[in-house]
Image (spheres, grey):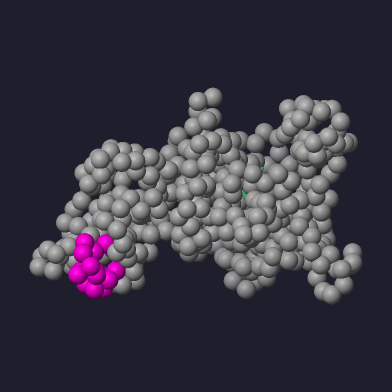
Amino acid sequence: MADEVKDQDLMNKIVSLCKRRGFIFPSSEIYGGINGFWDYGPYGCRMKRAIEQLWWHEMVETRDNIEGLDSTIICHPRVWKASGHLDQFSDLMVDCRDCKSRFRVDLMDDPNTCSNCGSHNLTEPREFNLMMKTFVGPVFDDEHVAYLRAETCQPIFVDFNSVRVATRQKLPFGIAQIGKAFRNEINPRNFTFRSREFTQMEMEFFCHEDEGMKWFEYWKEQRINFYRNKLGFTEDNYRIYVHEKLAHYAKAAIDIEVKFPFGWGELEGVHHRGQWDLSRHSEFSGEDLQYFDHDNGRKFMPTVIETSVGLDRTFLAILSKSYYEDTADTCKEGKDQELRIVLRLPATVAPIQVAVLPLSKKLNEAAEKLYFDLNRHFRCEFDVTGSIGKRYRRQDEIGTPFCITYDFESESDNAVTVRERDSMQQERVNLSTLRDYLEDKIGF
Ligand code: ATP
């Protein structure tokens, strides 16, 4: 119980910091907000882009057998018929006639009792499709219905042949896409964890059926390594859930789960999807999506291994493991055991990587020049307001790993003081080696 309170407390603190410091706030807030939609503010969008860029670099730019795609959000409605989303992508819901609450049947402790008011006066379970509907063209009738994509992977399957032919890739190879997905979630909750509009980062890897399990194991390991090596996740904050109940076409599936303040939650799925997706789109479109292997004259439907992760959930997972409050040693910086809120963000994704802080107004001009120099290589901020202690606290709260103080001696010794966020250790570094010093510590 104590832990639950603490964790709820942590979620409240994260939500509050995100709002206060401009990471994330409710969409259309001045109109009262809209449930399940969130805006990323100045620091938030810097960090979101950095995570996205890290993923893209890892999955596409460092590999010669993964191609990129940027498809439309709205595609032909038959895509969603073929994928099964129009017929099956739904949740079974009941409404309480007394208090008007709505529940997902599979999440209710007792499906005959309202979890809110205890009433037994419930409707029969009804299906709610999660696809977001719109109309294309001036006429709002059934013929003009279209859907916002519920996942970014379907256009990858649809464009499989175009990408393969254009790039002359041979199997095995993959196609990756980052983009918005929309789901009419019945009960958006847990901050951005379950939103109605969110960003996915997905990669579909096409191979021969005989090699499917080998590639499944390979991608599972690659993705776990990404979280460990690039984002600093440890065994305490992630775990692997192995699916035992599989979709009829799937051969294997795992989820990488992460500890959020509300408990463990799915961050990424690595799934062996067999030949299902390409076969369905071949059948529904009439286009043969089989692959012809010129080396041995064999024609076959490729098998697919998918890695699928939510960008917003990655963002929240990083915040959840990075939020700390400490008092230790802050007195060294002129504060008497003051509470310090610090985001121990990985330097690669911190919205600000280096803050340049002149010690006096008289030094602003020289320090600003240094800021402009560094800003060409790192995400930087120039902060001149308040005492140096206050400025450190502000940077700690947004997770800035390095603060550089430009002082009166800098003019004569051509050096600055670099203060590291977590240890608060300070080091004098010569300006001629500063960029290398920071590059070495920050990494990609
Ligand atoms: P869940 O079981 O949590 O509803 P899912 O299994 O339906 O998720 P997938 O369809 O596999 O999710 O989507 C891939 C990834 O997209 C998820 O692992 C998650 O990171 C992200 N995602 C899915 N739904 C949402 C949502 N409503 N809000 C934010 N991210 C989401």
Along the viewing direction, whichever of 309 and 42 lies nearer the viewer? 42
Q: Position of residue 21 (x, y in %)?
A: 45, 55
Residue at the image point whose x is 84% and y is 27% from the top: 120
Q: In this view, does 346 lie to the left or right of 271?
A: left
The number of numbered discs placed on residues in the rendered structure image is 0
Above or below, comparing residue 255 to residue 397 in the picture: above
364 inside magenta stretch: yes
Q: In which quarter of the image is residue 365?
A: bottom left
Span shown in magenta: 356-371
Task: List the single residue furthest toward the left.
Answer: 412
Horizontally, residue 97 falls left or right of residue 16, namely right
Residue 66 visible somewhere in the drawing: yes
Residue sitting at x 80%, y 50%: 129
Q: Nearer the viewer, residue 120 or 220?
A: 120
Where on the picture, by quarter, is residue 385? Answer: bottom left
> Is the C terminus in the top left, top right, bottom left or bottom right quadrant?
bottom left
Q: Is residue 425 above or below residue 125?
A: below
For the N terminus, the image quarter is top right
Quick check: is 62 in the magenta stretch?
A: no
